[in-house]
Image (cartoon, grey):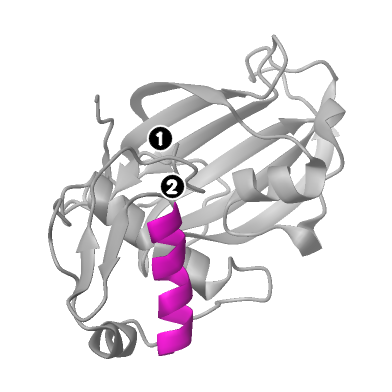
Amino acid sequence: MTNRNRNALPVYVQITELIIRDISAGRLLDGERLPPEREMAAGMNTSVGTLRKALGELTNKGLLERIQGSGNYIRAGSVRDSVYGLFRLELPEGGGLPRADILSVATVSKPQDLPEFGYADRGARIRRLRYLNDTIIAVEEIWLDESAGEVSEAALSDSLYHYYQKQLGFWITRAEDRVSIAKVPQWAPDIFTKPVGSTVGFVERFSWADQNMPIEYSRTWFDTDQALYVQRLK
């Protein structure tokens, strides 16, 4: 568990989010005892101090009970305040830490094939290669309406929603997904697991902040051999 680049989320946040996703996926069950901290830290290639910071975050979220002299126990309550709370792609076995490599960032006029969203004629177009842990799962194209603020490629992190909150001052409060199939776009890099033009899973997402119009539109082409779209109803 390491920072892949200078703008990656802090390691303790990565650990926190990975455990949250494992709780959501049912890989960690209510009442389950986590391994000893030194063993767990070694398995994640991190320090005990960093791990304890992550465990403290989980405790504050009500997802972990730390019993002196006994260990750390999962308390699978309501998962909230998660950086990846709206990220629906998971490994076939469940969970997985989302990561991303930026392919390109540009502020351009919205093309005619985009559905209506936002208030401006231009937007920031972000193209990325997505991973779960170290497995390549998808390519995605995110459009942020120009009215939401200027996007700086140098400051982007693995989580765009985290970037929106910290750098642009707004939070995505809800999203609508439309799941279907589509062909891998021409701009997909050769490293992607499916060739250009092949049919894969496809997710269109409209995202809202505090306005009536969605402020963001994204489309994700994902390899169904590597990842599944999962929506849990509670």
**Residue denoted by label 2:** 196
Asked if residue 102 lies left or right of residue 193, the reply is: right
Examine the structure image and report whether residue 56 is included in the region drawn in magenta. yes
Report the side of 148 relative to 8 (left or right). Answer: right
Q: Report how far apart the C-alphas of labels 1 and 2 lie in the structure.
A: 7 Å
Q: What element carries label 2?
A: loop
How many C-alpha atoms fall within 10 Å of the one at disc 2: few (<14), some, or many (≥20)?
A: some
> Which residues are drawn in magenta?
46-60
In the rendered image, residue 74, in percent from the top left (x then y), is placed at 22, 58
Residue indicated by mark 1: 183
Residue 78: x and y, percent?
Answer: 32, 37
Residue beneath the point at 69% across and 9% down: 212
Q: In which quarter of the image is residue 124?
A: top right
Residue 229, position in %: x, y? 29, 37
Q: What residue type is labelled 2?
A: Val
Residue 141, by quadrant, is top right
Q: Earlier in the sequence, mark 1 or mark 2?
A: 1
Residues under numbered marks 1 and 2 in contact, where contact means CB atoms less than 8 Å apart:
yes
